[in-house]
Structures are given as C-alpha cells and as structure tokens.
Image (cartoon, grey):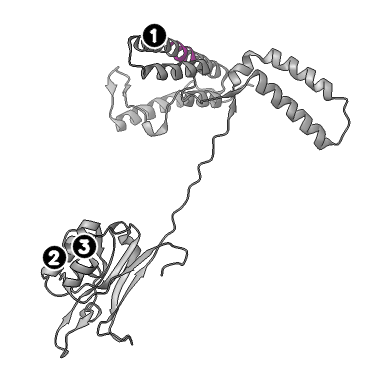
Amino acid sequence: MLKENVSMTVMLFFYRTHKIILSELNIFQIAIPTNSIILGDWKSTVGDEPYQNIVGSHGLGRRNHRGQMFIDFCEQNGLIVTNTWFKKPKRRIYTWKAPGDWRRHQLDYILVKHRFRNSVKDVKTLPGADIDSDHNLLVAKFRTRLKKIIGFRKRRPRWDLEKLYAQRQSVQETLEEKLGAIEGESGNAEAQWNDIKECMLDTISDLVGKVEKIARKPWVTQEMMSKMEERRKWKNVNNEEGRRKYRRLRNELKRATDRAKKEYLEKICNEIMEFQRTGRYDLMYMKTKELGWKENHGIQNVGIEDSQGNRIVDQRQVLKIWENYISELYDRPNRPETLEV
C-alpha cells in the first residue's frame, strides 16, 4: 500500500478509441514524470511474448498493431507493463470479457518507471468485484521505501600540533600570564572553568591556529600543504611565468617530500629496532603497522632454506622444516632440567 506522505503522481487515462488517444489526449507525445504510475484501459493487446525488459511472458493473447504502438510508447518513456510479469491463472489476467461471454482480453495495464519495478510486488484482477464496469478490477500491490537522507557533518577543525610544538615555550609563557591574571578572581566552579577554557582557546587560536587541510601522509607538513595549494593555482595559469613557477614549486615539493619521507621511515625503523632490543614487542608491532602493512595485502611467500641450503617455497614443506627445527631446538639432549633464577 502507498503511504500518504509519499509524493507520487498517479495518472489515470481512460479513453475509448485509438483515435482519441492520438488526436485529443496525444498521449504518445507527453513527458512522463519519474515517480508516476500510469493505469487505465489502453485498448491494446501486448500478448504473452516478452519484449526486452518492458513486457513479461505472462500476458494474455497475441500482440496487435496497437499493442506494438503501446510498447513503443513504454520504451520511449522507460516504462514497464507490470501485469505481464507475474504468473497467474488466466482468470486473474484478463481484464475485459467480450459480449457473449466467449472471448477474454487483457486491455487494462498498470505502468511504472523501470527504476521502480522492484516496488511492484503483485498485480492481478478481481473478476468478482462489484463495480459498475464491464472491465474487471485490476489491483496492484506496491511497497515504497522512503529515501534515506544522509547528513554530512562538517569536519571538526584540528589544532596545528606542529606549530604548537615549535612554539611551546611562548604558548606556555602566555598561558601562565593569562591564568595568573584570573587566578585571584572569585566565583563558582562553572564560571572559573569557563574563564580558564576561554583563556586557553584564545591563546591557542592567536599563537597556533588550526589546520586548514589534513595531510593524507604522516610525513607531509603544513608547509608542504601550503606549497601544494600554491602549485595548484599556478598550474591553471597558461603562460610562460605560470609554467616556470609551477615547475619550480613542483621540484621543490618533490625534494621536500622525498626528504621528509626518508626521515620519517628512518625514524620509524629506529623506533622498531629500539623496541625489539628492549623486548617491547607490542609497541614494535604497532610501529610496524604504521608503515602501511595491511592484513589484506597478505605476506609474500619468498620461501625458506632447508638444512642443505636449498630454497623451499612449497607451503607444506616449509611447515615441515619449521616443525623439525622447533623439535630439534626443544628436544636437544643438553637441555637443562631446571632453570636457576
């Protein structure tokens, strides 16, 4: 069932002859909105022969000329004939019975945009419905889902920690001076806390500032980010001076980033070796992860050497070598029975 708060245009077209369709309503020339349901007596037979993704294989009868024009209209507007896609007994398919009760036709159709075909759950006729018409009641079951609105929250600005570290002495002196001025003031705890917080925020804002953009790589500094922004501006200047300054900034950035990356990797490697020397394997593992070794990349199988010096790459043989090595290591005859602490 359709909910009341779902905005959906339902267009009802009831007409008697093919001439009215083309001359008065001119239905084949109008633009169909995206969220429309079109239903009515089309005086056309599309039949049980499938056609692309417009007509299914569960129609009734044989396609006639007006049925082909009707399919062309659906193809032009991206519509599907919903009551040809559900397998039903014939008494649930036909919509009109010829006088004399000897021939049945499917003339009424419900159309939706192809995008919303999954919203249609069932379509059938109700021959016994008490309605003032020689057509059977055609019923469709829809299930609509409201669009989920995803709100994009603004990224919270971060303080420039590099600048804070470089100017930590001046920041500390300024904070001590300002906090000393408000130390003797009396008041409740809430007012004192607001004064202290305002003092700290003002000092950090004046002396440090916030980071405009966050670097994706840990070795990229804010100075490099500023140069990248300047290089981007000169890239769009299509003259000799612009190209010259762009090349100069590009070369400076390449040298600076290569040097910063090398220093960063050397620092991480030195920390890893220091943690290994002191037995801090937990910190060593965390530092190793900072190098970008991700679990989904896996470990490259470079093989292992056996006791004769031959390189073995087969996984089963490698496990066997490790098993023998550990067995020999812990089953040696000169292993002490007790350990003196």
- The answer to which of 37 and 117 lies nearer the viewer is 37
Residue 336 location, x and y as percent? 54, 22
Quadrant placement of the N terminus? bottom left
Any magenta on residue 231?
no
Disc 1 crowd rating (10 Å Cα; few below 14, some 14-19, many 20+) is few
The first of marks 2 and 3 along the sequence is: 3
**Residue 274 position by quadrant:** top right
- The type of residue carrying mark 2 is Gln
Q: Secondary structure at mark 1?
A: helix
Residue type beneath disc 1 = Arg
| Mark 1 or mark 3: whose residue is earlier in sequence | 3
Disc 1 from disc 3: Cα separation: 62 Å
Q: Please, what is the dominant secondary structure of the magenta stretch? A: helix
Range drawn in magenta: 259-265
Residue at numbered disc 1: 248
Q: Is residue 263 magenta?
A: yes
Tell me the residue that label 2 is attached to: 68
Report the residue marked by disc 3.
28
Residue 159 % position (x, y) = 61, 25
Query: Counting residues from the N terminus, which is met first, the one under dot 2 or under dot 1?
Result: 2
Question: For this view, does 337 lie left or right of residue 105?
Answer: right
Give the amino acid at mark 3: Phe
